[in-house]
Image (tube, helix red, strand yellow):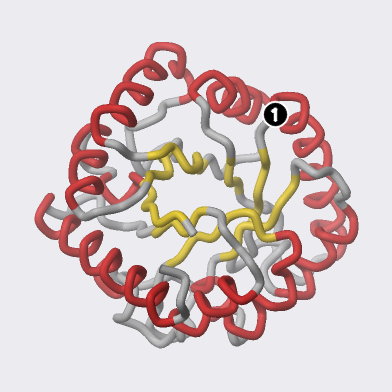
Amino acid sequence: MKLGANSVLFGGYDMETAFKCLAMAGYDGVEVSAIDGMSEHLVLDRWREIAPDVKRLSAEYGLELLAMEQPSQDSDKMESAFQAASEIGIPIINCGPGGKSNDEESLVASIEALGKLANRAESYGVTLCVKAHVGASIYNTPTTLRAMEAISSPAFGIDMDPSHIHRADENPVEAIAAVISRVKHVHIRDCKGRQHGPGAPEDQANGRGDIDLVGYVRVLHENGYDGPLNLEVIGAKEYSVEQCCVIAAETKGHMQASLQACGAR
């Protein structure tokens, strides 16, 4: 498994700060944030201008470009994301499921839209991943399985985030086993409680919450998963660089120890 972190953790700072700090924390790679309002990193409206900087920072700091997060399913936005990923060399684009929970019409519409986007991703040679998300149409294991069954494109995969599954009142260790056959990306973070949001940024650091992330990583390893394991912490835009670095470094240590505990490193 490749250990990385989403640059959105450093959303209050420029992209180089994110790369520099994640490299110092010992990560293998980075997920570049293209999340409007949460960062000014890979801004898709001017991706051609930014693309050379992403490539330069990757080479300079020795961080593999593992993925991009762009949550919207907007057609124009996704087209820019596919073009940027293809040009820069980013293999995976993570997007949100959209829609609302417990609404069959919304679920069907979301799956149909994702299927069309996966076909476009395939034409660009990249992979589109979606994760179950609290409040969205795909929000738990049963709805994730619905998407898996309906979308056959090899360019479609599941992005598993244990914090969302935990907040859907499921056991993430059991849930990951049910969908592992199509998991191509993992957003990892901890969570205290089962409230709507993931909690304070520091409580999203691996090891600070209620999720058995060691067991979660073990299931990934036992099933041969060798893709990205990217920390995704939101809400830290107003945090100091030092606070962001502590979260990144603390989680990197926990991730490394989890891999060692199950014999993956």
Q: Is 211 placed above or below 55 here?
A: below
Residue that appears at 66% across and 79% down: 175
In the figure, is residue 57 to the left or right of 65?
Answer: left
Point 53% across, 73% down: residue: 162
Other-residue count near label 1 (Cα within 10 Å), few / some / many at <14 / 14–19 / ≥20: some
Left/right of residue 208 with respect to residue 69 in the rendered view: left
Position of 208 relative to 8 (above/below): below
Residue beneath disc 1: 125
Rendered location of residue 157, percent (x, y)? 71, 52
Identify the amino acid type marked 1.
Gly
Q: Quadrant of residue 250?
A: bottom left
State the residue in front, 217 or 164: 217
Q: Secondary structure at mark 1?
A: loop
Could you say where residue 77 lies in the image, as x and y percent from the top left? 60, 28
Asked if residue 239 can be seen in this view, the reply is yes
Residue 248 screen position, x and y as percent: 25, 59
48 versus 117 height, above or below: above
Residue 204 visible? The answer is no
For image coordinates 59% across by 64% down, the residue present is: 160
Residue 247 in the figure: left or right of residue 41: left
Horizontal placement of 184 versus 39: left or right?
Answer: right
**Closest to the observer: 179 or 28?**
28
84 is higher (above) or lower (below) than 250: above
Q: Quadrant of residue 52?
A: top left
Q: In the image shown, does 156 or 168 lie closer to the viewer?
A: 156
Which x, y percent locates residue 133? 60, 64
On the image, which quarter does residue 76 sit in? top right
